[in-house]
Amino acid sequence: MKLAVIGLGFMGSTHVKAALQMAGVEVAAVCDQDEKRLSGDFSEVRGNTADPGGSVDLSAAKKYRAVGDLLADPSIEAVDVCLPTGMHERTVIEALRAGKHVLVEKPMALDGASADRMVAEAERQKRVLMGAQVVRFLPEYAALRETARSGRLGALRGAIFRRRCAAPGWGVWEGGGAFDLLVHDVDFLLHLRGKPEALSTTGYCDNDAGIDILHAIFFYPDGADVLVTGGWLNRGSYPFSMEFTATFERDSIEFSTASGAGVMKCPPNAGYAAEIAYFARCCAGEPNRLCPPRESADAIKLLRLALEARGRRGEKIACTI
């Protein structure tokens, strides 16, 4: 598959590094307005988990400064959109109309209507659209999914998902800490459990202080409720971490990068490589059952509802998505 990566910031450079290591995927083009990044020099790129740094060989990739020029290239089969979230809808729809398959970095959008328009356009154009929900492809989260579906530990009785870091200091992030971080966990709970019947949310937001935290309980008819908690804790230095605890009838399983318990032993970028490889298989005709775009749209709607409920200080409200 001839893939073009649009936007070479933290996530774009991460995707490039993963894709360059994969058989069956060719980074045929890149698009950015920064000449150093176009050359493969990512030394000034910053992110919340690690600084990619270093450089990669992009000598074989075509270089584009304008998205429209890239989309007019008939040799490009698929695009990986890693632009700021506010640019996703326009870019994704233009790419779909240009006949490209599209992988779009999370969050797909900041509101459900925008996400729905992208999904509808993909269906009209008969092209693959996939949200880059990398947590679905991380080995520990994949193991949790398979444990729940296999029933080997009995029924799920409850779960906690947590993800936090400092507010990003390398640029402006649309959507705050919730859409930066917790959209992953909201997406995964939908993947694991489906839509809840109700939710209750508390938290605090002070953009000037770099604080945007959310504590959301999602209620299910069987009583196996899920807590999603975390966000941006302050400005300055605070390491990124993620974790979960899932309690089943016969045992509990836990993963945490903060404590060192279950720290991933997989190679760097393994989750991103698995994500892109799955996208490539879908472009080749495999049905997208693992990460369908309507589920990514539902995650945005559910997180938006949770943010609206935060102002109600814990009042339990119906899930209306």
Image (tube, rainbow, N blue to C red):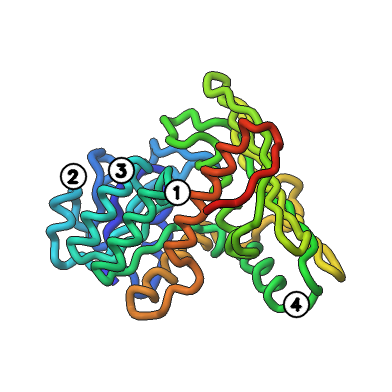
- Amino acid beneath label 4: Gly
Number of the front mark, 1 or 2:
1
Secondary structure at badge 1 equals loop
Circles 4 and 3: CB distance less than 8 Å? Answer: no
Mark 4 and mark 2 lie on one chain; the one further toward the N terminus is 2
Whether residue 174 appears in this view of the structure is yes
Give the quadrant of residue 65. Answer: top left
Whole-percent x, y for residue 152 in the image: 78, 78
The answer to whether residue 138 is seen in the rendering is: no
Disc 2 crowd, CA 10 A, few/some/many (<14, 14-19, 20+): some
Q: Earlier in the sequence, mark 4 or mark 3?
A: 3
Label 2 secondary element: loop
Q: Which mark is residue 65?
A: 2
Per the image, the residue denoted by label 3 is 87
Q: Residue under circle 4?
A: 151
Is tag 1's residue or tag 2's residue first in the polypeptide sequence? 2
Q: Amino acid at mark 3?
A: Met
